[in-house]
Amino acid sequence: MHEGDAAAAAVGGVSIAELAQGYGTPLYVYNAEMIRQRCRDLAAWDTVRFAQKACSNLAVLDLVRREGVVVDAVSAGEIERALAAGFTPHAAARPEEDGLPPVHPIVYTADIFDRDSLDAVVHHGIHVNCGSADMLTQLAERMPGASVTLRVNPGFGHGHSQKTNTGGEGSKHGIWHEEIPDILKRAEWAGLMISGLHMHIGSGSDLEHLAEVAGALERIANEIGRSLTTISAGGGLPVPYKPNETHADLGGYFQLWDATRRRLEERFGHRIRLEIEPGRYLTAESGSLITEVRAVKRMGRKRYLLVDAGFNTLARPVLYGSYHPIRVVTAAGRLASGEPQDVVVGGPLCESGDIFTQEEGGFVTTRPLPPADVGDYLALDIAGAYGFVMASNYNSKPLPAEVLVDAGSHRLVRARQTPADLFRGETV
């Protein structure tokens, strides 16, 4: 097999067939070096804060922490994950960042406090990014005098799907921009200091829409005033899933936000920390879902490949009609060849929506793929974000294993669930 073919039939230099046969399928595999590279792509920003909801395996969190990335948490569970991965709860100054305010290693971001998350925030002293006025009141009762960040809805949004649009009247997220004067009064009455401002309009937005956030944030920052020491551009950086898509102009995007930051620094007379909050950007391209072909059949004029992964394993296609590149690898470990055939790729679930080749709205489509037989493998690529974290036990299917590949070696970073795990804690 040619070197190029071997690389195409591998993840991070490790054969897909070897991984499937060693760990079983379905299986999530992450390429550590790709994650490191994506972290380093954003080195110009003062702070890179990983939205761990995209991929919260402890080994991945530890990896980004070692790259100098800090973390966002949206639940008590994510706070505990961050702590278990080595993040500390309290702000710390970095010697190389002379004059900048300390960075918060963990920030809790949400539109509500459930009781467990409020308890965890208070217990560990976690900084909070508040998405509702009621959060300010509830926090002040438990942590009087705390500094907080405000997540503001600027009145517009965008995303790769309407379901990932997090701005505008149709979104539940953030404090409505017109309510900022009342929020400032409430915070002052509650004895809270507003030290940060955050905006996020949607996941997978293009840079044109993301750039609109900078102007909106600057207007709100001027309303808040000199107490601000940190501004966050949010996340939503697009990732190329289809062959004709490309990476965004990150340099131009940073320059836009850096200019916004500098104008605010001049107005307020002190340094301001500039954050970005990527999720999918750091991990999406690192991940592949490996699944085995278990049946090949024809339904009328359509040919189906049925595999052992379903929307219980990777939910993005059924939720958003998302596209994932697909590679076919033979059981012998070779990249499949031959005249491509238009096929539908589906899973094992007792659901008509259990199709990986579908568009938003549930419309089943075909994909031209090389011929595959039972026992061959498919690798659904760019699956390292919103993959395992959205998996479920639907149809009483165990959660898959996760493996980290690094410099040609590989290790299990989450064991596959067993049948006994499925009903652990249940009683008759």
Image (tube, rainbow, N blue to C red):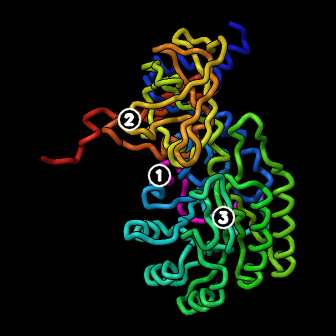
Magenta-drawn segment: 81-96
Q: Which of the 4 image quadrants contains residue 12?
A: top right
Real-space Cα separation, disc 1 to disc 3, in angstroms:
23 Å
Badge 1 marks a residue whose secondary structure is helix
- Report, in whole angstroms, how far the alpha carbon at label 2 lies from the one at label 3: 35 Å
Occupied quadrant, residue 6: top right
Q: Say which amino acid is labelled 2.
A: Leu
Q: Main secondary structure of the magenta part?
A: loop
Q: Amino acid at mark 1?
A: Arg
How many neighbours does mark 3 have within 10 angstroms: few (below 14), some (14-19), or many (20 or more)? Answer: many
Secondary structure under tag 3 reads loop
Viewer-closest of 293 and 180: 293
* Residue 148 x %, y %: 59, 76
Which three-letter amino acid code belongs to the residue tagged 3? His
- Residue 206 left/right relative to 297: right
User: Residue 10: percent from the left, percent from the top?
Assistant: 62, 21
Of residues 139 and 185, the one nearer the viewer is: 185
The residue wearing badge 1 is 81
Residue 37 horizontal/vertical position (percent): 72, 39
Q: Residue at point 40% right, 69% down? A: 114
Does residue 98 show up?
Answer: yes
Placement of 199 over or under 377, stated as above or below: below
Residue 200 badge: 3
Residue 210 higher or lower than 140, as above or below: above
Q: Does the magenta run of residues contain 207?
A: no
Q: Secondary structure at mark 2?
A: loop
The residue where tag 2 is placed is 349
Q: Nearer the viewer, mark 1 or mark 2?
A: 2
Q: How many marks?
A: 3
* Direction from residue 257 to residue 177 in the image, left or right: left
Question: Which residue is drawn at the image coordinates 38% and 35% (left, top)?
Answer: 349
Q: Is residue 211 above or below residue 87?
A: below
